[in-house]
Amino acid sequence: MTWLITGGAGYIGAHVAHAMAAAGERVVVLDDLSSGIPERLPADVPLVRGSVLDRDVVERTLVDHAVTGVVHLAAKKQVGESVEQPLLYYRENVHGLTVLLEAVVAAGVRRFLFSSSAAVYGVPETDLISESVACEPINPYGETKLTGEWLVRAAGRAHGLSTACLRYFNVAGAAAPELADTGVFNIIPMFFDRITHGEPPRIFGADYPTPDGTCIRDYIHVADLADAHLAVARRLAGAEEAGDLTVNIGRGVGVSVRELADLVGEVTGRRLEPVVVPRRPGDAAKAVASVELITKELGWSASYGVEEMVASAWEGWLVLHPEAAAR
């Protein structure tokens, strides 16, 4: 097998590329470098600079590298931005996927793994979110991910592809400092950014029906997420018949925002009392994955805890922001 990883120079993509290459899989990366960083990639992994919207580049990459499977991670992924620019999100996430699948089918590729999101669920009122819960996304980002799942499965049925859709919960941490998240869009980097500047972490709402009043989320270490991609890719590679696997990727463990803020204070040594600000629209009180299905289907489970996520993320933050260590 030779796997094409779209978006493979990004935060998650680079972790997937490292995990698959280290396991002996042949890998090539396609990335437009809008947020990807070439230096993240293993030295022996080829990088093709280009967009999934460019059919010619995609087809040439599939043929030139004799690709037999695709891991599709390239996408826009900021919820707020998707609300402000829905046309951009549908173009990049849905049309881009359409172009990619057209090229995949034309090239005779028969394995396709799609990076989805827990955002497809919306705000279900359930203790644990299983894959059978109704999908009712509440923002354009979640809509594009759910549409992407429909498209992947439809193409699989029509053209004999073995497909998988991985619904990520909250991704954090870093397998190595140089692979750390460079963005400040997720909660842990947002906390780091505040405390680095001597400002208290912000908690968006503390009046939810949870034990401490703050939202509860399921956090998954990015190294575990990459390992899950490897396990699913190998499942697809060994499939004798076309079919679809749709699974949550999480730990099945909830951590409140206040608990996470306290842990960030302990790990960084910068204990600043969080300040509570108004709720953000659409935030569910609790969103924790049921991980029974992936355990049953693949025997896979996460290895890292939230403490390791915060510690590895902080180590990466200090590498990316060396001035923070002096403050």
Image (cartoon, helix red, strand yellow):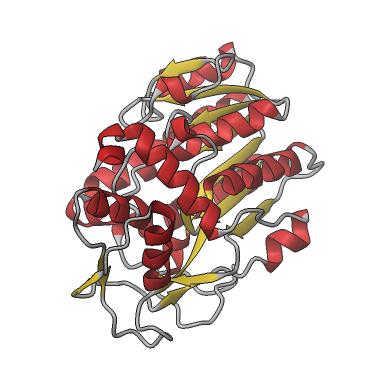
Question: Left of 286 or right of it: where is 326?
Answer: left
Extreme residue toward the top, this view: 64
Q: Residue at x 62, y 58 (%)?
A: 247
Question: Left of 223 or right of it: where is 295?
Answer: right
Image x and y of residue 122, in percent? 40, 70
Image x and y of residue 102, in percent? 50, 32
Number of numbered discs overlaid on the protein picture: 0
Closer to us: 17 or 224: 224
Q: Quadrant of the N terminus?
A: top right
* 35 shown above or below 165: above
* 124 shown above or below 138: below
**Residue 173 visible to the viewer:** no
**Residue 212 visible to the viewer:** yes
Q: Residue at x 52, y 72 (%)?
A: 254
Q: Residue at x 38, y 25 (%)?
A: 37
Q: Quadrant of the C terminus?
A: top left
Q: Residue at x 33, y 84 (%)?
A: 208
Closer to us: 175 or 15: 175
* 44 shown above or below 296: above
Closer to us: 241 or 217: 217
Image x and y of residue 146, in percent? 45, 57
Image x and y of residue 289, in percent? 56, 68
Res. 251 image quadrant? bottom right
